[in-house]
Amino acid sequence: MLTFIRQTALLSSLRTSFSTTSSCSSSVILNRCCQQYSYSNSNSYSCTTAIFTRMSSTDSNNNNRPAEPFAYYSSSSIHNLDLTALDSDISISEAKRQEAFDTSAKIKVLLIKAKRSLEQQQVNDTGSEAGADNGGGNDGGDCNLELEALIAKSLPSEKQSVRVANLSFQFQEYARLKSYQYFLSTGNLLPPSKLPPTISDEEYLAGSVMGLTEDLSRYVIGRATARDVSSVKIAKSLVEKCLKYLMKFDFRNGMLRRRYDGVKYQLKTCETVLYELSVTGLNVHGTNEIGTNSGKNENRDNDMDMDCEPQSKRVKTEPNGDASIADAIIPERELDELHARIEHRDDLREKLIKRCRDAQKAAKQAIFALHRPDYKRASRLIADCERIVKNDLNPIVEEDPSLHYGSYANVLEEYAEAKLFQVWLVGKDGDNGDENGNNKAKGKLLTPVEFSTIKLEPGEYLGGLCDLTGEVGRYAVQRGTQRDSDGVQFCLETNLSILFSLETLQRFPSGSFVHKKMDQLRRSVEKLERMLYELSLVEATGRHIVVDSVNEESIRGGRENNEKREAM
C-alpha cells in the first residue's frame, strides 16, 4: 500500500516536472524525482520507469501527433457506386479499338507497297528490268492479295456502320488506290459497284473521287515531263468532270468539304501544266492526237512515230476529241444514285437535329423542375424525352448508325443527367412525398444497367454522371441557405463517391470528354468542403439566420416598388 502511494506521488511529480521544465532530459527528471521519494529498490524503480515511459508516450501522442483527417465520408454511406462492370466493358472496347489500330497500320503498309508496285510495273512495261527488287516482280501480286484479304476481313457487315479507330481512312485510301488502277487501265472513273459493297458512300467520294484527283495531279506532272499531251488531257478531263459532279453536293463543314476544296486546285494544276506544254510548242488543241506512254519520240512539233510502240499502248480518242472523252469518263447513273443516297441521309440528319433539340430541351427543363422542386412536372418532362428518343430518334440512328455521335449522343447525356438527378433526389419510385424541398434527398445513384428504358453507351453515362455533380452542388447551395449542415455533407458524400468511382476506372472511353470534366468534379468537391466549413463557423457563432428563397413574385414586387420610388 505504501509503495502504491509513493508511486502515485511520483507520477504526479513527474507530470509537474515535465510541464514546467523543458531543458532537462527525461532521464535527469526521472533520477531527480526518484531520489526525492527515496526509491532505492530496483523493482520499484523498474515499475516507475514503466509508468514514466507510458506516461511520456501518451503525452507525446496527445501533444505532438496530429489528429485524423475530418471524416467527410461516412463508412455507412448509401452512395456507394460500383462501376466494375462498366470498367470491364470499357476495357473490352478499348482492346478492340487497339486491335483496329494495329490492323489499320498493316493496311497502310500494304497500300504503300501496292502503289509502289503499280508504279514499278509501269516502268517494267516500258522496257525496264523485269522483276526489279523494289516492289517489282511477284511481290506486287502477293502484296495485292494480302491487301484484299485484310480489307475483306476488316470491313464491317453494314455499309453505313460506325468504323472503329481510323479504319475509315484506310478504306478511303484503298478506294483511292483501286480508282487509280482503274484509271490507268481504262482512263475512266471507277464505278462504286467495282468496290466491296460495304465501302460507304462517303469513303468512295473521299477516296475514289477526291483522292483520285490528287493522284491525277501528280500523274499529269509526270506525263508532262515525258511530253505526253494526250494522257495529260485525259487526266485533266477526268478531274474537270469530277469537280462538276461534286458541285451537286452541299457539303457541310467536315472532311469531305475540306477535300472538295482541294479538287479545284488539282484542276488548276492540270490546266497550268497543259498551258505550259502549249507554250513549249506542243499542239494541245489537236482533235485526232494519239498519245503514247513513253513519249520518247515526241518532238516540239508534236510529230509522233505511230510504229514506235504496240497498238495496245496507245490511248485512242474519237473524232470529236475532248467532248467524246468527257462523255464516257464517269459512271453517271451510279453516281446519281449515290448522290440521292447522300441527300437522303442529309435529310435524316436535319430531322434528327430538330428532334434532338426538343428532347434535350425536355431533359433540361426536367432538371430545372427538380430544383424548384416540381417533381410531377419533372417526371412528365423526362417521360417526354424518353418518348422522343424511342419513337423519333432511335429509328433514324438505326437507319444510319453514323448519326449516333453528335446531337444524338448529347441528348442521351442530358437525359442521363436528368434521370440520375431525379433518382438521387426522389428515389426510383419518383415520389419524395413533400414538394416543399424539406425532405432529404434519397441519395440513390443509378448504374448503367439500371437504365432500362434507353440504353446508354459508357461515354454517355459517364458524361451524365459527371454533370450530375454540378446539380448536386446546386442542391447543396439550397441546403446551405437553410443552414442544413447534414444536407450539405450528404451532397458532399455523393460527389466524393462519384469522384472515387471515376478515378478508380482503368481508362475512360475513347472519344468521350469525361477526362475534361474531371477537373470540374474535383472543384465541386472542394467547394462543398469549403461550404461545410463555413457552416461550421456560423454554428460556432450561434447565429441561426436562414436566407429566404427568392421567387419570381418577390422579384416582380421589388421591381414595381423601385419604379414607384423613381416616379416620385
Image: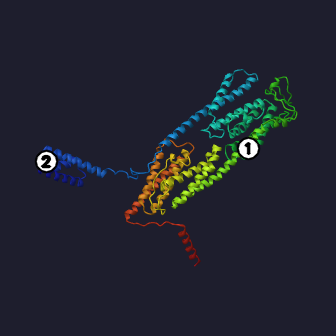
Q: Residue furthest bottom?
A: 568
Q: Would residue 123 be visible to someone looking at this image?
A: yes
Labels 1 and 2 touching (C-beta < 8 A) = no
Tell me the kind of residue under disc 1.
Ala
The quadrant where residue 193 appears: top right
In the rendered structure, the answer to whether residue 314 lies left or right of residue 431 reads: right
The quadrant where residue 177 appears: top right
Return the x and y of residue 47 as percentages of the image width and height.
17, 45
Specify the label residue 468 is tagged with: none
Return the x and y of residue 535 as percentages of the image width and height.
41, 61
Q: Residue furthest top?
A: 130
Mark nearer the N terminus (1 vs 2): 2
In the rendered structure, the answer to whether residue 398 lies left or right of residue 418 reads: right
Q: Would residue 261 be visible to someone looking at this image?
A: no
In the rendered structure, the answer to whether residue 298 lies left or right of residue 454 reads: right
- In this view, the residue in front, 69 or 418, is 418
Return the x and y of residue 300 as percentages of the image width and height.
85, 30
The quadrant where residue 442 appears: bottom left
Return the x and y of residue 428 as percentages of the image width and height.
49, 53
Specify the label residue 340 is tagged with: 1
Q: Name which residue lies at 50% across and 43% down.
A: 86
Tell me the kind of residue under disc 2.
Tyr
Task: Count numbered badges in the picture.
Answer: 2
In the rendered structure, the answer to whether residue 509 lies left or right of residue 48 reads: right
Q: Judge depth for marks 1 and 2 and give the one in front.
A: 1
Which type of secondary structure does the marked residue at label 1 adopt?
helix
- Which residue bears the numbered disc 2? 39
Q: Residues within 10 Å of mark 1 (few under 14, many from 20)?
A: few
Q: Name which residue lies at 76% across and 22% down.
A: 127
Q: Residues within 10 Å of mark 2 (few under 14, many from 20)?
A: some
